[in-house]
Image (cartoon, grey):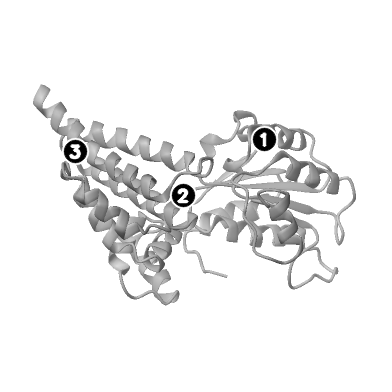
């Protein structure tokens, strides 16, 4: 398992709670994507369920349940059962929570405690969240819930109010350098660190997906109107006509990061306002991507258009002032 230097405070709080008279039953692990929250959840859950004198399995633990993206539909479920590749759903559905709740009707297998990990909890459908809320309000004895979330504000306030929050800080440049070195990443490291803004997962994806040319081109589109659309065409070429879901998600993360960083460093209020609006539109488009069957070529052109629009909006605001 990866050695995460940003987990020290989270471990201190978790172990302090374990040593207390009454361990809180609901936990939210909050922080940017790519900070090792799921690694922490798995290790922390194992520490909690292990009891002295009871032999423990070295692999999957029967008293640790994980709820994450399941098969997209019945066809995908059949493929999963046959051991074949299958398409994942784009959210955590109520049926998965219902299945988990039925399993909670029986006692833990090895000891007196069990843990349910939900990852990512911010991708639960509303009905799913409401179903989970019932378990959080009246948890079975010895049951603990760990909700991994990249965007805690998307959780229902009633869920947040019933959980204790552990926050995971971003990594500094030195920590990122060491982790990338340990992961065997040598090329594009500085560019990856700059684009990732403290997220090791994002930096690793940046390097593996060879996104440095894409990052450079995104920055160029933010600086000019691209009247003849050649810049947007080049962005589409760099992304690729058959980019899969993982690559497109990485592109969105990268574009949002570059736009946010430029907004923070801009000395022009008009430019900052335009960049903030572009960032919001990129977030919206990224959220729509899993639900709509976008043509990849049109989607990449739309990303380029949003980036160019930041420059045009900024120029127009300057002209009016």
Res 32 label: 2
Which type of secondary structure does the marked residue at label 2 adopt?
Answer: loop
Give residue 245's position: percent from left, percent from top: 49, 54
Q: Residue furthest right?
A: 106
- Tell which circle, 2 or 3, labels the residue nearer the N-terminal end: 2
Disc 1 from disc 2: Cα separation: 21 Å
Is disc 2 surrounded by few (<14), some (14 to 19) or many (20+) residues within 10 Å? many
The answer to whether residue 321 of the structure is visible from this angle is: no
Q: In the visual, does 64 lie left or right of 166?
A: right
Q: Nearer the viewer, residue 105 or 313?
A: 313
Is disc 3 surrounded by few (<14), some (14 to 19) or many (20+) residues within 10 Å? many
- Tell which circle, 1 or 2, labels the residue nearer the N-terminal end: 2
Residue at 81% in and 43% down: 101
Residue at 74% in and 52% down: 115
Is disc 1 surrounded by few (<14), some (14 to 19) or many (20+) residues within 10 Å? many
- Tell which circle, 3 or 1, labels the residue nearer the N-terminal end: 1
Q: Which residue is denoted by mark 3 in the rendering?
A: 311
* The quarter of the displayed image where residue 207 is located: bottom left
Q: Nearer the viewer, mark 1 or mark 2?
A: 1
Marks 2,3: beta carbons within 8 A:
no
Give residue 82's position: percent from left, percent from top: 75, 65
Which type of secondary structure does the marked residue at label 1 adopt?
Answer: helix
Q: Which residue is denoted by mark 1 in the rendering?
A: 129
Report the number of discs: 3
Quadrant showing the N terminus = bottom right
């Amino acid at each position: 398992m990866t050695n995460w230097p940003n987990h020290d405070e989270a471990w201190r709080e978790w172990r302090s709670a374990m040593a207390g008279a009454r361990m809180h039953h609901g936990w939210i692990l909050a922080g940017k994507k790519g900070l090792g929250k799921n690694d922490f959840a798995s290790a922390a859950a194992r520490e909690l369920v292990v009891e002295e004198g009871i032999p423990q399995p070295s692999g999957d633990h029967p008293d640790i349940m994980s709820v994450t993206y399941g098969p997209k539909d019945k066809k995908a479920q059949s493929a999963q059962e046959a051991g074949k590749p299958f398409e994942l759903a784009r959210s955590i559905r109520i049926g998965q929570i219902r299945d988990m709740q039925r399993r909670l009707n029986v006692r833990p297998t090895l000891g007196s405690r069990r843990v349910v990990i939900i990852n990512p909890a911010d991708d639960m459908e509303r009905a799913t969240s409401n179903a989970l809320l019932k378990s959080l309000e009246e948890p079975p004895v010895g049951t603990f819930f760990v909700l991994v979330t990249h965007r805690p504000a998307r959780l229902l306030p009633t869920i947040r109010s019933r959980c204790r929050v552990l926050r995971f800080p971003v990594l500094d440049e030195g920590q990122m350098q060491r982790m990338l070195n340990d992961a065997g990443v040598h090329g594009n490291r500085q560019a990856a660190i700059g684009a990732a803004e403290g997220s090791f997962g994002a930096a690793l994806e940046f390097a593996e997906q060879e996104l440095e040319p894409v990052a450079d081109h995104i920055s160029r589109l933010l600086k000019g109107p691209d009247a003849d659309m050649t810049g947007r065409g080049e962005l589409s070429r760099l992304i690729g006509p058959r980019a899969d879901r993982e690559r497109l998600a990485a592109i969105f993360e990268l574009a949002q990061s570059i736009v946010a960083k430029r907004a923070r460093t801009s000395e022009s209020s008009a430019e900052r306002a335009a960049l903030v609006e572009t960032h919001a539109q990129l977030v919206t488009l990224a959220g729509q991507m899993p639900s709509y069957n976008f043509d990849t070529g049109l989607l990449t052109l739309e990303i380029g258009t949003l980036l160019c629009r930041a420059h045009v909006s900024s120029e127009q605001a300057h002209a009016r002032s």
